[in-house]
Image: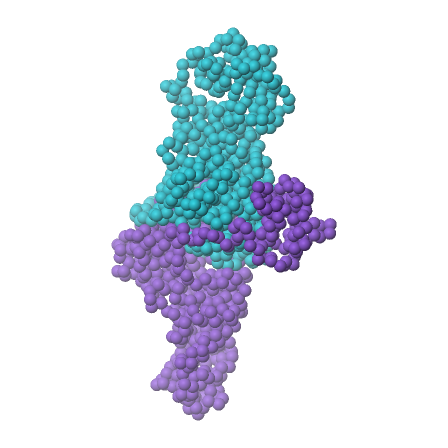
Chain colours: A purple, B cyan
């Protein structure tokens, strides 16, 4: 039907008053359309009779134009089928200059008219085809095994029932789907301790639209907005786009620091459930302090509860909005963490007057989030799929995060920069001081590894250049070890590439007999990659045992030996049960394990105190 | 699963350190949740044992709290089922004051923090439940028979195939669905004569988002933006929100007037296919003039092609973008006219650098339009459903618009304000000079009729207060006559309500014998409601014939007679074939038909010239 002659008419517009013959005009239009790739190879053209009818020209005119195009190789005549765009690339294909406006060859530099408010930042964007990479350690990009395909299909099918379509396909103006509003209001929000009337709730095109609405409604040149440092680059961009003065408030192990620097703020953004990007959960004391400061200093709070449901290692603390006695908290959350980014829905909770204003701005800038998706999401929630998916995501994330932790512990000990983070899906990793994470990112990408630089998240000049972030949403647990092993190789190769940084090898290495004297027996006090204490006891008979975690709940045993001037160890479970050999150096009571290039891979403190409690060896337990 | 005890835990947060007993705290939390409507009647609560476990309190504490709530009527215990929120409204339900933050009772007036850029206009919004009204003459609201339910379901089901979900559920960042881009690029755009590379195309959340992106990117306090007068209120709002200086350029029968007033513009908005809101199609001469002016005066053009496909009464003229030799046209269109507003997709075509900027702003403010809908829309197009739906919409719209025209001709002759409009789905109607359309809208709403005021579309002070718009997308053809009849009644009643406006009855009415002398025979020159000439010939034998349209192509015959002092007529087909009687008044050669209150219902010119060609009576043909 798209091949009907009439549908081609606008392309073949011919004008008898022009200098060119009608036949020539038709010929040129076809060539232009091929050049501009509007006619793909193999596309059928209307018959000369039909096209002549539509254009109001003689059949012979079209026939002769077609004949010439066939002779030139642009078209092919197929016996008993018709005329087609040639499958083979004719000479000149894609090279034709067009009389009129050619795609991408505008005479006018239209960008000089852009003088409104527009974004400027150039923060890291992972490649759109990230899923073609073997090791996409990109937070928030979900590998295809995570999308709840069957469940979403069921919800969508229900939303496609005739009576459902009749409801959501009607344009109700600015009103959100009442079914979705009720699911959010009576199921999701109560779990966070939040009550909201339906006039205090707005559905958005993902949480990003909620941020935009807040930014445009609240920010002007006089507004002072406090953001987290480190924090989301897009939030800085949004608020500064509308002219606000930004205050960058540091984050510590308890979350956003609450102190006198918040004074004078109009709006304070905070991600208490899991700070973005560090993953720190704001303590209860800090939450109360922030609410008290909001009342004392008279500011509003934007609570970003993006990952509220992902606290699988501990119970979620109540949302700020549920603790808020005064109505100072604007609560923003996403359904996309669970529905995956393929379905763009989020929501905000705020006083009804604020919601009113946000609704009007949403209407003016996008109208409503697609009603069909709103209805399907309502079914997804009411069928309990959201909760099932949440449980699954928690389980999968936990498995993957542990795999990442174990791999880092093995290949990049002491590299986790912010610890301990409970739950979540990311680790911040610190490389050697001289590492430029941007250089590493490019080198890693060439080896199939995607990682994110950390410096994008910092706005203050001392943003760490040697840090990057690893996320586990994009690849299965089974791939994580190989990914980290490859990444570690890339890092070592980069180190090599800078000869000035290579320490003199063999300097201070212990000989075999020195190692034996020192190590049998010995107690090594060690910190795991995720910052927990670990005690390793080496016995003179070549056996060893280890206990890690604050409660010593993770235990393993193994053996150690000496070959040449290197010390070898092999755990039963830890470090993937692999044998690994190091050179040894001693500086006071500080022991370093060195690789063949003399670089310190890891280290421990040699305890001279005899241990009073023997370590049990037994089955491994999870940390 | 949502009823699991754990999911209730945040709501039941209790704190032993507070003054109240734990039992009392639980009791109050339940009452608050009922009052705030978080617990709907009939909802099951967790057993006292389970809830006690989760809260870490004794089972007796929960048991006693439940018992008291049952005694108070808040809860019901059902034999062998459990504890439920009472179905009957207990005293105090919905009336309970809450200790902490109550829904809608915020202590802080948060709106005072809103000092960013926000919309202000209060243009007419039709009620969200418009489909409950019997006669919703609201343009762009589609009655449920119009949504292509079966076709959209097929497209959605295909997009829900496992391999499709795997593709669109992956987050590809800012990139649109390649399948949809290809369908638009190779099928929709060529019909409008437009070529575009995939880097010159951006999918948007309906065309409204495209307008927003352009407004924010191009408008600042120095930018001069030219809009149509009358024009879309939301466009005025959008551009002025970002500070632009607006020029309101009039529209005539050929579309936007191109003259010296365009000088100095940076951006000129135009809706050439069907001007919004008048429905006028821009002539080819005017199109060329506008493009020449753009080159001469150096401005860009925003081409709004919303209704490009709805020109069912004539062939569509080429889009400005297809005639644009310089790359000055930003083309914006919607898929929602055919997909209906339930699926929010639009797109824009512009030079690649502009698309780049728009993509970045789209990313920052909403991310992408939902990928699942993009894929489903791609299937909808590739299956040919878009074209089938378009044909259907054209057929239905034509039928409805003719029904509206006939009804107006019968009940409100000479009322169409802008004519002739070819195709489209609306008519602008002019009421009596003293009509306040806002008053009429309220009165009509009470009778089940929704109409839109025209003055919202005008920004200049002489915007007509007595005009309104009637659209036919929202109700079937069979309902249109009854709707216009009722509307006409409401208008007459409003006229009554103002006694000063009631003309003296019976003044100058002709008596029966005067009517007979004047009317047998007579030729009446008349204009139909849609502005076409109509000639009516009355014969002495009581027969009559009529011919209307510029080519006289619509013909009918009937009879006329006199009863009392009133003149009656009845057409075979015209005016629904109904008999209708009027009083007659003559002023020079001007004849007026009057109702019983003496109001002129319609009029004609009495021709003294004998007609030389007799009118054939024959089967009625459509205008």
Q: Is residue B209 above or below residue A337?
A: above
Location of residue A374 in the rendering, given as x and y in whole percent from the top left corner: 49, 48
**In terms of depth relative to the viewer, which is nearer, A116 or A189?**
A116
Rendered image quadrant of residue A364: top left
**In terms of depth relative to the viewer, which is nearer, A584 or B279?**
B279
Location of residue B76 in the rendering, given as x and y in whole percent from the top left corner: 44, 45
Location of residue B434 in the rendering, given as x and y in whole percent from the top left corner: 39, 24
Q: Is residue A265 above or below residue A615?
A: above
**In terms of depth relative to the viewer, which is nearer, A578 or B61?**
A578
Location of residue B174 in the rendering, given as x and y in whole percent from the top left corner: 48, 57
- Residue A564 in view of the camera: yes
> Across the whole image, how many numbered discs are drawn on residues?
0
Q: Residue at x 50, y 30 (%)?
A: B419
Q: Residue at x 31, y 56 (%)?
A: A245
Tell me if A299 is positioned left or right of A202 in this view.
Answer: left
Question: In the displayed image of the protein, which residue is found farthest to the front?
Answer: A19
Question: In the displayed image of the protein, which residue is found farthest to the bottom?
Answer: A513
Q: Image quadrant for the C terminus of chain B?
A: top right
- Residue A161 in view of the camera: no
Q: Residue at x 47, y 61 (%)?
A: A140
Q: Is residue B454 above or below residue A556?
A: above
**In terms of depth relative to the viewer, which is nearer, B200 or A621?**
B200
Question: In the displayed image of the protein, which residue is found farthest to the right?
Answer: A80
Q: Is residue B196 above or below residue A523?
A: above
Rendered image quadrant of residue B149: top right
Q: Residue at x 37, y 19 (%)?
A: B500
Rendered image quadrant of residue B55: bottom left
């Amino acid at each position: 039907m798209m091949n009907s002659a009439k549908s081609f008419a606008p392309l073949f517009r011919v004008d008898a008053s022009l200098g060119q013959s009608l036949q020539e005009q038709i010929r040129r239009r076809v060539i232009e359309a091929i050049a501009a790739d509007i006619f793909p190879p193999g596309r059928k053209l209307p018959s000369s009779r039909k096209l002549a009818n539509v254009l109001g020209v003689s059949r012979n005119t079209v026939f002769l134009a077609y004949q010439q195009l066939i002779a030139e190789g642009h078209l092919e005549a197929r016996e008993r089928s018709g005329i087609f765009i040639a499958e083979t690339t004719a000479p000149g294909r894609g090279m034709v200059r067009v009389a009129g406006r050619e795609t991408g060859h505008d005479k006018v530099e239209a960008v000089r008219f852009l003088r409104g408010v527009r974004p400027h930042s150039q923060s890291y964007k992972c490649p759109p085809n990230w899923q073609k990479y073997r090791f996409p350690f990109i937070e928030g990009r979900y590998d295809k095994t995570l999308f709840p395909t069957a469940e979403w299909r069921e919800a969508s099918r229900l939303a496609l029932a005739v009576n459902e379509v009749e409801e959501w396909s009607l344009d109700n103006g600015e009103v959100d789907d009442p079914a979705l509003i009720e699911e959010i209001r009576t199921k999701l929000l109560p779990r966070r301790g939040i009550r909201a009337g339906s006039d205090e709730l707005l559905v958005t095109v993902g949480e990003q639209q909620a941020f935009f609405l807040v930014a445009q409604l609240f920010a002007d040149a006089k507004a002072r907005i406090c953001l987290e440092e480190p924090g989301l680059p897009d939030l800085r961009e949004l608020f500064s786009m509308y002219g606000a003065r930004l205050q960058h408030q540091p984050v510590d192990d308890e979350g956003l620091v609450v102190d006198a620097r918040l004074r004078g703020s109009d709006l304070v953004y905070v991600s208490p459930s899991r700070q973005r990007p560090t993953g720190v959960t704001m303590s209860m004391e800090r939450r109360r302090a922030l609410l008290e400061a909001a009342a004392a200093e008279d500011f509003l709070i934007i609570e970003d509860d993006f990952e509220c449901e992902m606290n699988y290692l501990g119970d979620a603390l109540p949302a700020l909005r549920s603790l808020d006695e005064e109505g100072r908290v604007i609560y923003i959350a996403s359904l996309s963490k669970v529905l995956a980014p393929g379905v763009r829905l989020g929501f905000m909770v705020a006083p009804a007057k604020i919601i009113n204003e946000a609704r009007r701005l949403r209407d003016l800038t996008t109208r409503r989030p697609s009603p069909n998706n709103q209805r399907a999401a309502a079914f997804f929630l009411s069928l309990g799929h959201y909760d099932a998916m949440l449980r699954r995501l928690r389980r999968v994330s936990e498995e993957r995060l542990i795999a990442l932790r174990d791999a880092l512990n093995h290949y990049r000990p002491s590299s986790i920069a912010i610890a301990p983070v409970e739950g979540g899906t990311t680790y911040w990793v610190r490389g050697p001081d001289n590492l430029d994470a941007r250089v590493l990112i490019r080198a890693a990408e060439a080896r199939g590894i995607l990682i994110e630089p950390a410096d994008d998240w910092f706005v203050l000049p001392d943003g760490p250049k040697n840090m990057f972030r690893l996320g586990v949403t994009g690849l299965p647990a089974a791939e994580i070890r190989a990914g980290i092993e490859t990444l570690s190789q890339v890092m070592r190769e980069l180190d090599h590439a800078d000869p000035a940084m290579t320490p003199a090898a063999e300097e201070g290495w212990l000989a075999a007999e020195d190692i034996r004297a020192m190590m049998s027996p010995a107690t090594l006090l060690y910190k795991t990659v995720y910052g927990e204490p670990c005690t390793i006891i080496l016995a003179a008979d070549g056996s060893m045992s280890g206990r890690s975690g604050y409660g010593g709940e993770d235990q393993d045993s193994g053996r150690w030996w000496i070959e040449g001037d290197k010390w070898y160890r092999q755990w039963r479970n830890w470090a993937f049960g692999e044998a690994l050999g190091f050179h040894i150096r001693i500086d006071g009571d500080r022991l370093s394990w060195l690789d063949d290039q003399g670089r310190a891979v890891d280290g421990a403190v040699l305890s001279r105190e005899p241990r009073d409690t023997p370590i049990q060896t037994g089955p491994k337990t999870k940390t």
